[in-house]
Structures are given as structure tokens and as C-alpha cells.
Amino acid sequence: MRGAPGRMVRAPRLDGGLALILFSLLTSGVQLPPPMGDHMQDMGVMLLLFGGTLVVPGLVGLWERASRPLTRRIYGEEGALGSRNIQRARLRTALTVAALMVGVAMILSIRAVSDAFGQDISNWIQRYIGGDLYVHSNLNMRSELGNQLASIEGVQAVAPVRYLDIKKVKPEEATRT
């Protein structure tokens, strides 16, 4: 016979509730400057997911009891059986919900990191390369294309640049090929 579910499954966690309160404070409409405001909103979403992960296991039983009549009406006896199974295996249900929330948090954090990298690259291009229009081709372009672009009204300068892909090879690898 299994033992009774632990404290985490029986009652909502207080620290999860505090994380949800912090989330509401961080996203309550206080407008911060763009870099700081974006980071605070990201932190707020992480707190929402963290707080939900801690609070949901204790609330599964309440949600199941509240939705039991509707579930039974929609799905019949199968719905009642599934609803009772949630109550019977609350730890498994809580762990499933927590795992889903952690997965969503990971996806959001990876997206935030990739957005930050994209912003850094965009800032670097604007700061060090400049220019409003880049014309790129995999084939060599004719030199008169630069002259045609320079003759357009409003164009201040045209700078032909050629980028080459270079592969670094160690000396011992060069002799093998």
C-alpha cells in the first residue's frame, strides 16, 4: 500500500504564491525603459512559471472536484473515471504539470537568449558597419552596379565590399590534403 501524498501535493506552496505575487508586481503596468523593462518582463514570466509549478500540485485536487460534474456531463463514465484517477494519482498529475511548466520555461528562456543574441548582432551591424542598404549576391557583381546606385538621388556614398569565407586549417592538416 502506498503512503499518503507528501506536503507538496496536499497543499499549495507558500513560496509559489509569493512568486506569483512578485510576477503581478513586475508586470503590473510599470513602464521601464526598453532594456530594463524587457528584462523585468522576462523575469516576471519566469516567476509566473516557477510559482505555478509550486502552486499547481496543491490545487489539482480542488480543480478536479470543481470540474468533476462538467467532466462527467461531457464525457460520461469515462470522464468520471479519468477525473477520479487525477485525484487518486495526484503526485503523478502534479509532476506532469510541473514538467510541462518547466519545459515551457526552458523554451521561453532559450527564446530570450536567442533574441538577445540577435539584438547584439543587430547593434553591432548598426554601430560598426553602418549603411542603410546592403546588396548581396553569390555571384560577382559588375562594377557599374555601384555607379548606378551612386547616381540615385539621395545616395550619399557607395562602398563596394567583398566578403570571403575563410577556413582556418592547422599546418598538420594542410599536409594531409
Image (cartoon, helix red, strand yellow):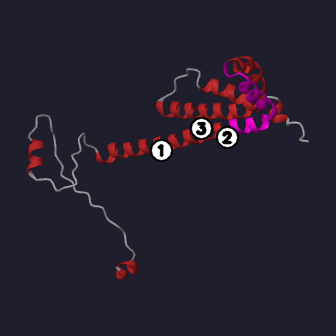
Badge 1 density bin: few <14, some 14–19, many ≥20, Cα 10 Å? few
Rendered view: 121 above or below 82: below
The picture places residue 95, in percent across and down from the top left corner, at 73, 39
Element class at badge 1 = helix
Residue 76: within the magenta?
yes
Q: Position of residue 114 (x, y in %)?
A: 47, 44
Pointer 3: what residue?
Answer: 104
Q: Quadrant of the C terminus?
A: bottom left
Magenta stretch?
Answer: 74-98
SS category of the residue bearing label 2: helix
- Please name whichever residue, 66 or 122, is drawn nearer the observer in this view of the structure: 66
Q: Earlier in the sequence, mark 1 or mark 2?
A: 2
What's under tag 1, amino acid-wise?
A: Ser
Identity of the amino acid at label 3? Val
The residue tagged 2 is 99
Dot 3 falls on a residue whose secondary structure is helix
Instruction: Classify 10 Å Cα crowding around label 2: few (below 14), some (14-19), many (20 and above).
Output: few
